[in-house]
Amino acid sequence: QVQLVESGGGLVQPGGSLRLSCAASGNIWHGNVMGWYRQAPGKQRELVASMTSGGSTRYADFVKGRFTISRDNARNTVYLQMNSLKPEDTAVYYCNVHQTPTDYWGQGTQVTVSS
């Protein structure tokens, strides 16, 4: 089993920044993929960004140039630096660890972008 603990969400004004963190513990495998998804009210959960243990990244088009994913393999922690936030970024953000064939999810952290 894998446990994920997220932190860093909150309320921010448009144009502001937030940094999300997710610490994984338990049966962590080398070679996994760690990432962030989000789900806005009435919408499906969608990929924001992911990163392999080797450093390859994948970003959704709507965050390219604004968000940066990083990870510390020694600490089994993944980060999401979010800059130039927009109201449409408002959602619950979920940490994900994919260890084939299983996906593990955090409890979610609310990000609200509003003036």
Image: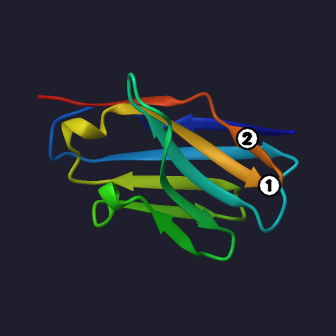
Mark-to-mark CA distance, 1 and 2:
8 Å
Verify CB contact (< 8 Å) between mark 1 and mark 2.
yes
| Callout 2 crowding tier (Cα within 10 Å): few <14, some 14–19, many ≥20 | some
| Image location (x, y in percent) of residue 115 | 11, 28
The disc placed on residue 114 is none
- Seen from the viewer's position, the closer of residues 20 and 59 is 59
Quick one: SS at disc 1? strand
Task: Name the residue at 82% across, 66% down.
Answer: 30
- Seen from the viewer's position, the closer of residues 24 and 57 is 57
| Callout 1 crowding tier (Cα within 10 Å): few <14, some 14–19, many ≥20 | some
110 vs 38: above or below: above
Residue 111: quarter of image: top left
Task: Name the residue at 71% across, 46% down.
Answer: 24
The disc placed on residue 104 is 2
Kind of residue at disc 2: Tyr
Kind of residue at disc 1: Gln
Task: Name the residue at 54% across, 30% down.
Answer: 108
| Image location (x, y in percent) of residue 112 | 29, 29
Q: Residue furthest left?
A: 115
Q: From the viewer's perspective, tell me whether residue 32 is left or right of residue 45.
A: right
Q: Earlier in the sequence, mark 1 or mark 2?
A: 1
The disc placed on residue 99 is 1
